[in-house]
Image (cartoon, grey):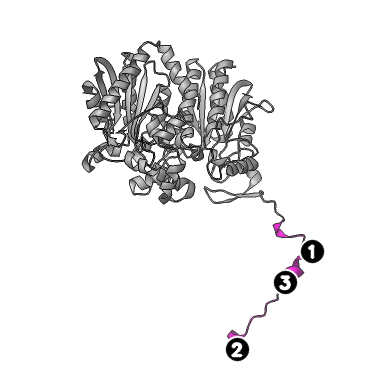
Amino acid sequence: MEDIKTSWDIVELSRQQDRMTGHELIDLIFEDFIEFHGDRSIGDDKAIVGGIASLKGKPVTVIGVQKGKNLSDNIETNFGQPSPEGYRKALRLMKQAEKFNRPIICFVNTPGAYSGATAEERGQGSAIATNLLEMSGLSVPVISILTGEGGSGGALALSVANEVWIMENATYSILSPEGFATILWKDGSKAKEASELMKMTAKDLLENKIVDKIILEYNGEKKLTNEEIANNLQEELEKALDRYSLMSKEDIKLNREIRFRKY
Amino acid sequence: MSLFKAKKKYIRIKPSDYMGDDTVSHLDVPEDMFKKCPHCKNIIYAKDMGDEKVCPCCGYNFRLSSKERLDNICDEGTFVPFNEEIEPKKTFDFPDYEKKLEKAKENTGINEAVVTGFSKIGGIDTAIAVMDAGFIMGSMGIVVGEKITLLFEEATKRKLPVIIFAASGGARMQEGIFSLMQMAKISFAVRKHSEAGLLYVSVLTDPTTGGVTASFAMDGDIILAEPGTLVGFAGRRVIEQTMKSKLPKDFQSAEFVLEHGFIDKIVKRDELKDTLWKILKLHGTL
């Protein structure tokens, strides 16, 4: 890994539009993906994609935040900021996975949960709270992978997992550095300074045991292709799920609880 | 025309002559004798607010310190603090954070933004946590998260209900990602308490926002709120920036979230203890 990058460099890399979206990752890593829609209550949030697929022949539930690669996509997916109905859709799919004893894999890349008026009206806080509570009790293994921006409660709502992995140039933080600087110094332009203090890069997060594994995007100086990254992820996921397949439901729950109790 | 030009003669009074002794002055009114209501802007004689600190003109609920809240809710002399002194598992070298913590401790007389313990309400035993908005805006860092987690764990052991008075601006920014992790950590303890068939009542008080709204505050079996409480996830300014327009005044009020179906009931402060007692009683936890 290159050590010369500053935290701000990584923040910028984590936001690049050419990063793999939830859809792309799902298509590259899994087979037979069938997308399911809707929260069974008020709508279908395009910022969250999810459904069932197979990982080397084994059924899994996959959920991803969908950021767009261009403006029109981004308008549809709300720049990867899920609404309450998106979190409820994700939770519905997770409960379904639990019923059919399928592992759950989440890909997280969001600047944060949507913060518009409709999100408040539909209970954004309540939706996230419910996801945290329900994910804490899932009896199937959950692996969450931070693939770009991991923005606050909006990212955590898909990351109460047995293992949390992060891509080399992704971030995970309490708030965007801009928001952080605004709250603490009333000056959003100090985002760069904030990013250094926030310990939000993959390396910092691994050191602080917030994440369990870094998925490389570079091999020395050479940038890996999307296919290469996806292949690595596929292998890592397969290995991890093999480990969990030997564990009882109770142990899977306990494993997740111990992971979070240490904070 | 001299009539109009003539200068009226006033008698000049020098304050010192008038007051005589300058130890007696109008500044002698005790500082907290009168309060200005931030809601209706009236000046109120503090004693008229009562122990509940409610504006007699408009019913606005002044923010209570954790001690005032406990005095209001718990049967006299029954509150026993739990984990009053708890050391953070980690220290944060965030600029000026130490100083800020020290100042908050000095100003509030408590160690962190939540007070937890056990007490009786109308004779019924309960675990109770009260957040204090006077302590760095009630923000949740490691210690707050740990105290609430430990309270749920202990209540599960003792088979007691939990009542939490939320009052928080959200996660403690200075503790960064570790603050975020508290939301998840507490959720596990809430779940285990719930799986044991025990009751959790969440009472939202001004303000309940951010990471606290997005975790345990919204996890109650029953969620109550005081009238006029600010309840929301994102901050008003953030939403206005997102929307590029101004929001109505009652947006994110307790009344607003009640109307949208996210809380069970709004309860006036002077009826809160009685309501909590009835809820506890109906759950057979006597």
Q: Amino acid at mark 3?
A: Lys
Depth order, front residue of B256/A77: A77
Instruction: First in sequence, mark 3 or 2: give its number.
Output: 2
Who's the residue at 63% across and 24% down the image? B119
Q: Which residues are magenta?
A: B3-28
Please tell me how crowded label 3 is: few (under 14), some (14-19), or many (20+) other residues with Cα within 10 Å.
few
Q: Amino acid at mark 2?
A: Ser
Answer yes or no: is residue B112 visible. yes
Instruction: First in sequence, mark 1 or 3: give its number.
Output: 3
Q: Chain of mark 1?
A: B
Residue pointed to by mark 2 = B2
Residue pointed to by mark 3 = B14
Q: Is residue B279 left or right of residue A40?
A: right
Residue pointed to by mark 1 = B21
* Same chain for the residues under marks 2 and 1 in the image: yes
Depth order, front residue of A233/B11: A233
How far apart marks 2 and 1 lie (CA) works out to 42 Å
Identify the image quadrant of residue A147. Answer: top left
Who's the residue at 26% across and 27% down the image? A230
**Are dots 1 and 3 in contact, CB under 8 Å?**
no
For this orientation, the residue located farthest to the bottom is B1
